[in-house]
Image (cartoon, helix red, strand yellow):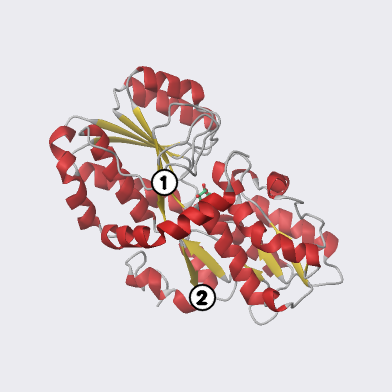
Amino acid sequence: MSLSWRKVAAGVVGLGLMVSSVAACSSTRSSTSGSTSSGTAAASDTLIGIAMPTKSLERWNRDGAHLEELLKADGFKTSLQYADNKVDQQITQLQNMINQGAKVLVIASIDGTALGPVLDTAAAAGIKVIAYDRLINKTPNVDYYATFDNYGVGKMQGQYIEKALGLADGKGPFNLEPFAGSPDDNNAKFFFAGAWDVLNPYVQKGQLVVPSGKAPKTDDDWASIGIQGWSSDTAQSEMQNRLNSFYTDKKVNVVLSPNDSLALGIAQALQGAGYAPGDSYPVLTGQDADKANVLNILAGKQSMTVWKDTRQLGDQVAKMVSEIVSGKDVTVNDTTSYNNGVKNVPTYLLDPQVVTKDTVNILTDSGFYTKADLGQ
Ligand code: BGC
C-alpha cells in the first residue's frame, strides 16, 4: 500500500489547528464568495465540470448542489452530472465535459482506478482536474485533491467503540461485527485502516470476538468485508445473514460501520432481529450525518456518526477552481500523504468531527440542519 497510515494521522494532528481555523472562517456561504471573488473576472465564460457518483446517497446531492451554487455565484458556467454509480456513465459524462470545453473538472470518482484514459484526453486539452473527496489513482493527470482526513474518520469510529465499551480498561469480551466500504472506493481502505488500527489489538487480545469470522487479519484485507457500492440493502442482508448464522445463541454488542448508508441497512437488520433501542442495543458507528441517520441517533438506533461538513469541502474546492482559472497558486495543506500510485497529489485536508445524541446540536447550530429537519 502506497500510503503510510501513521503519516497521515500524524500529519492531521499537526494540521489540526490550522484546518480548524480555516474551517471556522470558511463554513458559511458568504465567506466563500469573499474568498473566491478574485477569480470572478476570469470566470464569466468558463465552464467547470462537476462529476458526482450518485444521487442515491444524500451527501452527494448536497455536495453537488452546494458546489454548483458556489461556482455559479463566482460567475462560472457549470455542468453537474450524476452517474448512478456506473463507471462507464461517469466516463461518458467526463468526455462530454471535455468536448464542451470545460477548463476544470471536479470529480468524485466511482472507481478511483478507472479514469486514466479519459483523463489523458483531459490533460491533452489542458484541462485541470481536482479529485473531490475520493482520490483518483494510477494517473499523472490529477492535479489536486480535496478531502476530509479519511484515516481520521476511521480512527474516530474505532476510538468511539474503544471508549464506549471500556476496552482500554480491559473490559470484554464483546461480540463485534466489522463492515467496510465499497472495494472500488479509494477512501474505504483509509476508513477501515483508521478503525482497525484501534480495534485489531483488542481482537488479538480476545476483548473483541468476531463470531462470524469476518475479521480481516490486517488492514490490507479490508476488501474481503467490503460492501459494493456502499449499498444499504447489501449491508442489511449481510447483517441479516450474520445474525441468522452466528447469533442464534448470543447477542451482537458492537458493529463497525464505515458510513451512514451501511449503518442504515445494519440498523434495519438489527430491528428485524428484535434488537430494540436501550442498554443492550449494540454500539453502531457511521459517517456523513445523513438526516435519516441523525434521526436514528436521536432514536437510539445508531450511536454516532462522523460528520464531514461538506459545505467546507465545497468552499475549498470552489476556491481551488478560482485559483486555477485565475492562474494563482492553489491552496493546499498536505503534499506528502496522498500518493496515487504515480505521484503525491497536492491535497487540501479538512477535519471531520464526531456527532452523538449529546452533541447533535452541532449540526443545527452550524446550520447544516434546521431543528425542524431533526423533528426538534
Ligand atoms: C465518502 C463517504 C461516503 C461514501 C459513500 C466515500 O467516498 O467519503 O462520505 O459515505 O463514499 O458514498
Q: Amino acid at mark 2?
A: Leu
Q: Could you tell whether 26 is left or right of 160 in the image? A: left
Give percent across and percent down for residue 88.
52, 27
Q: Could you tell whether 214 is left or right of 96 in the image? A: right
Residue 82 found in image quarter:
top left
Q: Quadrant of the C terminus?
A: bottom left
Mark 2 is surrounded, within 10 Å at the Cα level, by few (under 14), some (14 to 19) or many (20 or more) other residues, namely some
Please tell me whether residue 5 is drawn above or below residue 305 in the rendered image. above
Q: Which residue is located at x 35 percent, y 44 percent?
A: 332
Give percent across and percent down for residue 350.
40, 54
Q: Which residue is located at x 35 percent, y 59 percent?
A: 18
Residue on which disc 1 sits:
334
* Between 188 and 339, the one nearer to me in the picture: 339
**Label 2 beta carbon within 8 A of ligand 1:** no
Report if residue 209 is visible in the image.
no
Marking on residue 298: 2
